Image (spheres, helix red, strand yellow):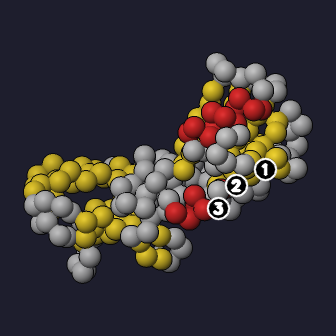
């Protein structure tokens, strides 16, 4: 395509991990060939394309630019697998700047936490801010009974007075690990918001419990503090 080159992957699959914010775009209206799909991808600056001959869908992966400190959409930090090694009806194309985009659009104003990134957000003006967070859901097992599911993470919200120049530290909980056994799935991670230099967080949303093949995961308690702090 004009502007960027794309590589056809023999693996018919590519993974985008949850360290970056990504979205999937599905287009069907113009689907006639790989060239048209890649041309549209080039316009959208996507990093990978899945062409599916069976469903006649052109699926594009786009990386949201968080390098400026502006977070991506809620739920966009997830691991995505495009295509499948066992699906011979799909072709997966990788943009030449795949790795470069993942690196350049990742949050640069962040630090490494225990198992991921702590994102920073600087308050531009003094005022009362509504802060909301969700904890992640627990993991699943492959052996399940009808009606058994992982526990949902909590939703928490608070109105908080912040001063210009304050730096919020944001930790986003990740979903619990899925397992191929009746038991042993992981619990969901909690989400935390705190001010740089403070001892205690201003907001915590706990993660949901993992399920087993016989017992549903526990939901975390949801709360909202409406008064200003």
Q: According to the image, label 3 marks what residue? A: 99
SS category of the residue bearing label 2: loop
Residue 25 in which image quadrant: top right
Whether 225 is drawn above or below 107: the answer is above
79 horizontally vs 84: left or right: left
SS category of the residue bearing label 1: strand
Q: Nearer the viewer, residue 219 or 13?
A: 13
Q: Residues within 10 Å of mark 3 (few under 14, many from 20)?
A: few
> Residue at the location (71% across, 45% down)?
82
The mark found on residue 118 in the picture is none
Q: Position of residue 186 (x, y in %)?
A: 61, 61
Whether 79 is drawn above or below 168: the answer is above
> Residue at the location (41% across, 71% down)?
110
The mark found on residue 96 in the picture is 2
The quarter of the image holding the C terminus is: bottom left
Q: Nearer the viewer, residue 37 or 189?
A: 37
Q: According to the image, label 1 marks what residue? A: 7
Q: Position of residue 228 (x, y in %)?
A: 10, 55
- Total numbered labels: 3
Residue 179 in which image quadrant: bottom right
The quarter of the image holding the N terminus is: top right
Whether 169 is drawn above or below 50: the answer is below
Instruction: Tell me if residue 219 can be seen.
Output: no
**Tag 2–tag 1 contact (CB < 8 Å):** yes
> Residue at the location (56% across, 39% down)?
44
Q: Position of residue 93 (x, y in %)?
A: 76, 45
């Amino acid at each position: 395509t004009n502007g960027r080159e794309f590589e056809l992957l023999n693996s018919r699959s590519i993974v985008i991990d949850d360290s970056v914010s990504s979205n999937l775009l599905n287009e069907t209206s113009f689907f006639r060939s790989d060239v048209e799909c890649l041309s549209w991808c080039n316009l959208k600056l996507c990093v990978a394309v899945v062409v599916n001959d069976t469903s006649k869908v052109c699926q594009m992966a786009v990386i949201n630019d968080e390098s400026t400190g502006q977070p991506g959409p809620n739920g966009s930090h997830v691991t995505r697998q495009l295509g499948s090694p066992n699906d011979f009806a799909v072709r997966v194309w990788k943009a030449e700047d795949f790795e470069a985009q993942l690196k350049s659009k990742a949050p640069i104003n962040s630090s490494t936490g225990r198992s991921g990134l702590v994102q920073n957000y600087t308050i531009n003006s003094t005022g009362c801010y509504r802060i909301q967070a969700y904890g992640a859901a627990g993991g699943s097992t492959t052996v399940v009974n009808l009606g058994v599911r992982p526990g949902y993470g909590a939703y928490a919200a608070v109105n908080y007075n912040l001063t210009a120049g304050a730096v919020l530290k944001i930790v986003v909980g990740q979903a619990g690990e899925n397992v191929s056994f009746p038991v042993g799935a992981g619990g969901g991670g909690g989400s935390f918001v705190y001010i740089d230099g403070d001892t205690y967080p201003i907001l915590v949303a706990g993660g949901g419990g993992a399920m087993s093949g016989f017992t549903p995961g526990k939901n975390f308690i949801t709360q909202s503090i409406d008064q200003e702090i």
